[in-house]
Image: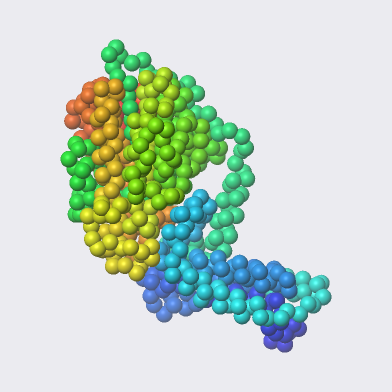
Amino acid sequence: MRALFRLFGKPTLDSPLTLAWLGALWLGLFSNWPLWQRMLALPELANGGGRVFILVFAGMVTAVLGALLSLFAWPRLIKPALAVMLLSAAALAHFMGSYGTVIDPTMVVNILQTDVRESRDLLSIGLLLSLSMLALLPIAWLWKRKLHAHPWPGRLGRNLLAFAAGLVLAVGLALSCFADLASTMRNNKSLRYMISPVNLYYSLGSVLAAKRAEPKGPPEVIGADAKLAPREAGAKPRLLLLVVGETARSANFSLNGYGQPTNPELAKADVLSFRKVSSCGTSTAASLPCMFSPLGREAFLEQKRPQETLMDVLQRAGLAVLWLDNQSGCKGICERVPNAMAAQPVKGAAPLPAGLCDGEECLDGALVQGLDERLAALDPERVARGVVLVMHQMGSHGPAYYKRSPADRKPFQPECKSNALQQCERQAVVNAYDNSIAYADWLLARGIDWLKTKSDRFDTALLYASDHGESLGENNLYLHGLPYSMAPKEQTHIPMILWLPEASSQALKLKSGCLKSRLDQPFSHDQLFHTVLGYSGVQSQVYRSDWDILAGCR
Ligand SMILES: [Zn+2]
C-alpha cells in the first residue's frame, strides 16, 4: 500500500486522479445498471460462479474506464471530462434500460440523423430522472472539489502509470475468467454494445472514420444505359405509387393473420400481401438506402462507395418521378430528383385540411392531399412516358405511437398516450401501435382510390413496403435498431403489399393467379429495386429479372 501511495501520491479528494477513479467506479457500477441487469438475467450466469463472473466483469469495466479517465486527470480537464461521460452514460442508461436498445455504429447513425421533433418524442420524466440521479448528482459533488495544481511532469507520470495500471488490472481480471468471458461474449454479442459510455464513443468514432474513408464527389453512376422498353400500340403509360412504410411490422397486419382488425380497408381492396418478407436493416438509416439500391442486402453491406439510387435510374430512363416525404427526409436517396415535403403547400391545390398538420409535423394523411396538382406540376413529356411517385410515411414511428393517428381514427382502445412505454399497460401500447397501422391501412386505401381516378390515362399499381419492424415489449425489447444478427423477427419481418388491378396485370402479361401463389414465398428488400424497374418497363444492365417479383409470373 505504501508503495502505491509513493507511486500515485496519497489519494486525497483534491487530486484529479482520485476523482478520475471515483468517476470510473460510479460509471462502472451505477451508470451501467442496464448491463448488470441484462447479465443477471442470463440463464447461463444464474449460479454462484456466474455471479462471481459478473463481479469480475464489473471490475474489468471499471478498470478500463479508470484507465481512460486517468488520461484526463488534469486539474482543468477532469471535471468537464467526467461531466461529459456522466451525462452521456446517464442518457444511455435510460434508453438501454427502458427500451432494451444497444448502442452500435448503426444506432449512432440513427441518432445523428434524428431531427428535433423525433428526439423530442424521446424526452420523458424517466430520462430527466436518470440524468439527475446518475449525472447531475455526482457532477454537483464534483464541482465543489477544489483541485490542487501539482507540477505537470510528475502529474503526467502518475497519470500514465494509472492508465497502465488500469489496463493491467483489466487484462488480469479478464485472464482470471477467460473461459466464462469468451463464451458469454460469444453467446451474447449485444453485451459489448452495452458497456457505457465507451459503446457510444467507439461507435461514434467508427462512424466518423467510415465517413472520412468514403470517397468524395458524386455517387457512382448506376444504370447509365437505362431506357424504357418500347410501349405496345395502344398501351397506356404506367403509374406506380410506391409507399415506403415506417416501423410497420408484419405481425400486426390482419391481412397477415393478426387478431385485431388492423386492415379493414385493404381487406376489401383485393390486394396481394406477401407474408414472408424481411427487411434489409433494423432502422431507417440502414434500410432506406438499401431498399433503393440494386445490390441487395449482402452486397450493399460490403459496398464501399455510395451509389446512385432507384430514383436516379427511373429518372434517367425518362420517367417522371417525385419523392414526397412526411418524415425526416429521404437520407440522400431523392437528392437528384424532384422531391417535396408533405407539409409544403401544393401550388393550385386546396390548403391542407385543419388538424392534419400542427405547424411542423403532419399526419400521414397529408401525403394524399393535392396529388392531382402534384402530378400536374411534373414534366408533362416525362409523365406521358410513365410516373413513379414515392410516398415516405411517418407510419408507426415510436415511441409516441399515439401521435401517428388522428383522434377520429383510433379503433383500438384504451391507447397509451405516453412516450414512456413502460408506464402503460402493454395492451395499451399495442393499441396505440395498432391504431397507427390501421391509419396506414386507411392511407393505402386512399392511395388506391386516387390511382383508380387515373385509370383512364395510366395503367396503375400501388406497392407498399415498410422499412423495418418494431419490438413492442417482447422479451422487454422496445422500438427497433438492434444489430441485425441479434434482432428479433419483430424488427425484421415486414409487410409488403401490392395492388395491381386487372388492366395492369394484363398490360404486364402476368399469368393469372401466379402472384397469389407466391404470397408465402420468402422475399426481402432485395426485390424492391428490380420489381419497380420491371413494373415501370425500364431496361438496363443493372436490372435483375430473378429479383423482380413480377417477372417470375410473366
Ligand atoms: Zn424507420
Image quadrant holding the N terminus, namely bottom right
- The vertical placement of 282 against 97, above or below, is above
- Between 201 and 336, the residue placed more toward the observer is 336
Residue at the spot 43% in from the left edge and 59% down from the top edge? 121
Q: Is residue 248 visible?
A: yes
Location of residue 56 in the rendering, given as x and y in whole percent from the top left corner: 52, 75
Indicate left or right for 511 with 66 as reference: left
- The vertical placement of 29 against 299, above or below, is below
Q: Quadrant of residue 87?
A: bottom right
- The vertical placement of 468 against 461, above or below, is below
Image quadrant holding the C terminus, namely top left
- Between 51 and 486, the residue placed more toward the observer is 486
Residue at the spot 41% in from the left edge and 35% down from the top edge? 346
Indicate left or right for 81 with 155 as reference: left
Location of residue 506 in the rendering, given as x and y in whole percent from the top left corner: 23, 22
Location of residue 361 in the rendering, given as x and y in whole percent from the top left corner: 42, 50
Location of residue 45 in the rendering, given as x and y in whole percent from the top left corner: 41, 73
Residue at the spot 74% in from the left edge and 82% down from the top edge? 9
